[in-house]
Image (cartoon, helix red, strand yellow):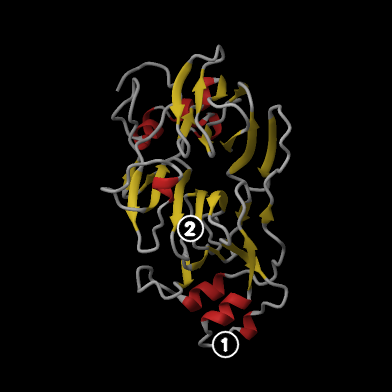
Amino acid sequence: MTDAPLVPFKLVPEYRRHRWAGGMFRTILKRDTDSLPGGESLEVFDLPECSGVIGDGPFSGCSLHELVESRGEELLGRRLAGSKRFPVTLRLIDAGSRLGLRVHPACESGSRNDLLYVMACSPGAKMQAGLARHAAKSAIGMSPSDNDLDRMMLSYLSYPGDSYFIPCGTPYSIGAGNLVLSIGDNLGETFVLNDWGAGGEESTDLFSGIDAVNFTMKVPLRSAGSVDRSPFNRKFEIVRDCPRFGVWDMRLVSRWLDCTGGRCHLVTATNGAASIGGPDGEEIVRLATGDTAVVPAGFGNYTVTPEREGITCVLECIIT
């Protein structure tokens, strides 16, 4: 491995095939997926079974896990320098049909939290997140029907730019016709309460899932995307209460100067191409729609430059 300083980089996506896969990787992201598995794309990942590999630049061929082990402080910052793995996973979900109803349980080692961000959607697409006011564990029964589980959920029509912060204990489901960016910390497990007749692709555990649901938390979880079309750069905080990452939605019309501040940043172009560069704006990594750059904690000042006229949406995740 080279001793050169770490610079922003992209990982090679890993695609996973699912029966519920849609066609938005091809139609929206313009990715050639005809010969690839569809439905899910791991974009930033360091899991026990696999770790993302850098595709270009001085660290080409190096895995994210190798960087965590050998350059941890430079990559993640001083506080996370001793991490055994990269602390979050960023993936894209292309839902052609409805995904299973799932929940992340609380656990002693730490509880998993997720952000779901709607990049694009078909007319009438829906998301389910959180419990309706009347939902009660005592009303579920021993053999609840699909309708019983449906009625306990809050449902929302999907709009690009909407986001949902999913804390542990909160059931959720991604509806058909959504292209979703998911950011989650690498902690705990997931129970699927119902796969909505997906033919057994996902292993369901209804009773463990019901036990994991926090029936006392009944608050709306949708954060509506900004509809302001003002022709200047703006930045909106959309996740602030998560102990392991924060997320900001940036609406850019020109070059944006940012700084890592000693923390690793993940920068995703969500509706148009952009480039990540040094403080002088010189391009280091180009992001097509849906691409994510990892900006190392030690890099310092960097720029995000949209390629097109008008507003380009960029999601920034800061690992804390």
Marks 1 and 2 sit apart, C-alpha to C-alpha, by 26 Å
Q: Amino acid at mark 1?
A: Gly
Q: Position of residue 265 (x, y in %)?
A: 54, 32
User: Going by the image, does 78 lie left or right of 9?
Assistant: right
Question: Mark 1 or 2 closer to N-term?
Answer: 1
Task: Locate residue 296, reporting x and y percent.
Answer: 49, 27
Quarter of the image for the C terminus: give it: top right
Asked whether the residues under the numbered discs 1 and 2 touch, taking CB atoms below 8 Å apart as contact, a structural biologist would say no
Q: Is residue 194 left or right of residue 239?
A: left
Helix, strand or loop at mark 1: loop
Mark in the foreground, 1 or 2:
1
| Image quarter in which the N terminus is found | top left
Please report the residue visible at 63 percent of the width from the left and 75 percent of the height from the top: 152
Give the residue number, with chain letter if any, for mark 2. Answer: 188
Mark sitting on residue 42 = none
**On screen, 21 above or below 238?**
below
How many neighbours does mark 1 have within 10 angstroms: few (below 14), some (14-19), or many (20 or more)?
few
Residue occupying the far top of the picture: 280
Identity of the residue drawn at 61% across and 41% down: 247
Which residue is tagged 1? Answer: 141
In the image, 98 versus 104, the foreground residue is 98
Q: Nearer the viewer, residue 78 or 147?
A: 147
Residue in the picture at 72% in, 73% down: 133
Q: Is residue 206 above or below residue 257?
A: below
Residue 252, percent across and down? Answer: 63, 29
Q: Amino acid at mark 2?
A: Gly
